[in-house]
Image (cartoon, coloured by chain):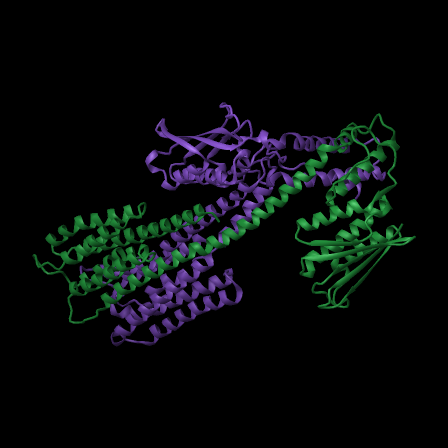
Chain colours: A purple, B green
Amino acid sequence: MSGSQVSGYSRPDENTLGVILGKRNRAGVPAGSTAGRAMRQASARGGSLGTGYLGVGASVIATVQAIYGLLAFAGHAATYPSLLPVVVAWLLYALTLVGVAVSIAARGERMSNLFFAAFLIMLAGVVALDLVAIWPLHEIGGYATASASAGFGLLAALTLRREWEILVAAIVLGVVLTVAVVMTTPLTAETIPAQLLLVATSVMPALVGLYIVRRFRRIVQLELDRVLVQSTVSAPRFAVGMLASEELARLDLAAEELLDSVAMGRIRLPLTPRTASVAASLATELRLHLIEGRRETWLYHAITESEQLGKSVTLVDRGSLAGLLAPQQRDGLLAAVWLLVNDQKSNPTASLTLGPVTTAPEPGSRTITVPLVITTTAISRNRVDPATWDAIGKVGRFIDSTHNSSLRVEIECRVNNPADQ
Amino acid sequence: MTITSVELIAKERDRLLQRSTRVIGLGSTVIALACFSVPGVLDGTTYLATLPLFVVLAFSLFRLGINQSVVWVCLGMAAGLGILVVVQVPVGDPPGPAIGAALIPLAAGAIGSFAIVLTTAVSRIVILAVGFVVTVVLTELAIPGPFLVSMEGAAVVLGWILATVLGYWLSASIPRAARRIYSIGRAHRAERQASETEAQRRQGARLLHDTVLATLTLLAHSGVGVTVSAMQQQAGEDARLLRQLRLGGTPMPQSSGDYNLEPVEESALGTTLESVKQRFGRMGLEVSWHGTGQVLLPSEVLDAFLLALAECLENVRRHAGVTDAHVTITDDETTVRAMVTDAGVGFDLKDIDEARLGFKDSVVARLRDVGGNARLFSSPGAGTTVVLEVPK
């Protein structure tokens, strides 16, 4: 521990009470915080979580379609002026699909730039060979087989490459086939439907695949967010949260190093203004921690740590009453709020107000009643998921009403009287 | 996880299936309508008769995107099959030869897409099978030609197979992902509890007797007003308190509030050992103590001894693959000895670089600084024993 290490202590982006010193991300969680980091890691994991299995499914679909394509090819075999290019095209297509499968099995769920380029070149070769073979027939839509499968072949790379790359490849394929059709096929009432079908089947698999993968990832992210926040349900009455505890350890270590350097004489007394200001900021942050940080509850941490809840839910809980709720009540409340604000289209918001406790506890009763009011915007009564009411029922008896065309729920939560504990 | 979680994830799965059906179905409907609209494919009257059915089909697909009722599936399929029937009604001119190609996006895509939401329950699979058979038969009847199985019919079969595979695969992939998410969630909950306990321990100890803040505040004024030696003494005490806190102890400073200028010469080993035991217990390593409980050691020797001991236990926790370790403390007139043993995997001393275990730096060096020593015994499969010695 040297003086340089001590002066190496730098102010963090935020203190651990969530008081922002730096910028925040859109979720309202400080970017440098534990929660922010966990969220980024979760996002990275969420990006690939389960999509491997989805990618295998896409390859299965491509393979099934290829079997049909081969049957169609066999059906037309007698018509081709020259069979060789189509046969080579099909062999190349099979090689491409097998190559991707082997690469995934051997090297995991990823596709390097080089491999993707080779993949695209091979698919381009498939299309070129097939088109060369059927060019003299002047009926691309009717006879295209391997080139019609190439659009499905792109599905093999669906989960391994960026969206726009797949999209561009699919569009290029569609354009190439359209140009080939226009150059060779006389467009009449007899031929147009088959040509339309060909171009549509070359572009649609990739478009639909991208749509499904995007929605799938969104589901995984939301579920991950919900599950991470769910862990607050078992937190003690007052919690310092994931943000604070690591931060407190860091501050303690910085203070220990500074004090140790002073004790050992590595830092001369009296201190330089620079070192003194480091000591001052450490003292301030530690003090804030030890005093104010103890009034925050699991619900506060759940909302600030969640990407989904952070942007749509506000909490007013001056008495830290949320800490009194039992785990089942917390579970219900969290699920209810989640279900209420989950609708992504209308950007609904919810505001939770706890307390004040006004009703005196009945004599001899060990419980008190905490009033909890959920006011919402952009949530109409009839759009509420039925599971929400079950979830609210777990929190306590409730009355719901419509206020300014949005839902309002008043809940009476019976909780153990903290004075008896 | 809770029942709510299972319900929520099932709901998300259904929604994904419904939205996929809607996208594929509506896309295919548009293409089918475009094919039908090519002049010469269908007689004018027949074409006009299909339009209302197209509207019903599209509306059903749209509703299916937000409503999981099977009613919309049946209505949409009925409308699609209705189109297949209408094109066969002998009114006006017979359909052109291109009708075969024009029926594929309708029968394979628009009607077939309903298969995506029909794989999740037995009753739905029945609807799927009936819809499939009727669609294929009607398509074959609608296509002019002598073949029993036409290429167009094969394309319709393909469309239904692809939709069924897609539906099945999507509904299987959501619970798979969910299981992994829940295991991440469980790990996160454990992490939260550990960090919560740790933070509360730190806060609790500090609120009881915190001189660190007072000392830092003095230092913030450059330490003016206190003699240099007193300041250093106090800073040393506070650094020591924080270090013990970091190592898992619950320190009991000799005074609180005002400044403690008396150096603390000796501390009892026993109470500190108990806190080390608790710390490893929280991390999943059960430590059993044997032998002498109360040994008084000079503070810098105690520090080095505890740090070395904690380091050894940390190695056991990380590398040995067991959940318990034994520490035997013995002492004679001149020396205190700790023997850390585990029944873990062990290793060959020649194979493992001691530096890699952090042994040389963190254990041996620390003990040598205070006149002690450490020795390491291990062989593969026979566990590991470390003997730590410090002078009294």
Q: A266 and B71: which one is in front?
A: B71
Expressed as whole percent of the image width and height from the top left, the position of residue B203 reads 68, 36
Q: Residue at x 75, y 51 (%)?
A: B310
| Quadrant the C terminus of chain A occupies | top right
Position in image of residue B128 (x %, y %): 27, 59
In the rendered image of this protein, does residue A26 appear above or below residue A353?
below
Q: Is residue A214 above or below residue B254?
A: below
Position of A115 compared to A179: left or right? right
Residue sitting nearer the eye, A94 or A264: A264
Residue that lies at the very extreme toward the front in this rendered image: A364
Identity of the residue drawn at 79% across and 52% down: B308
Q: In the rendered view of the protein, which quadrant contains the N terminus of chain A? A: top right
Q: Residue A59: where, in percent of width, then height?
A: 41, 63
Task: Please state the horizontal and vertical placement of residue A242, each as a whole percent of the image.
Answer: 60, 41
> Can the viewer see residue A130?
yes
Please state if B306 lies on the left or on the right of A295 as rendered: right
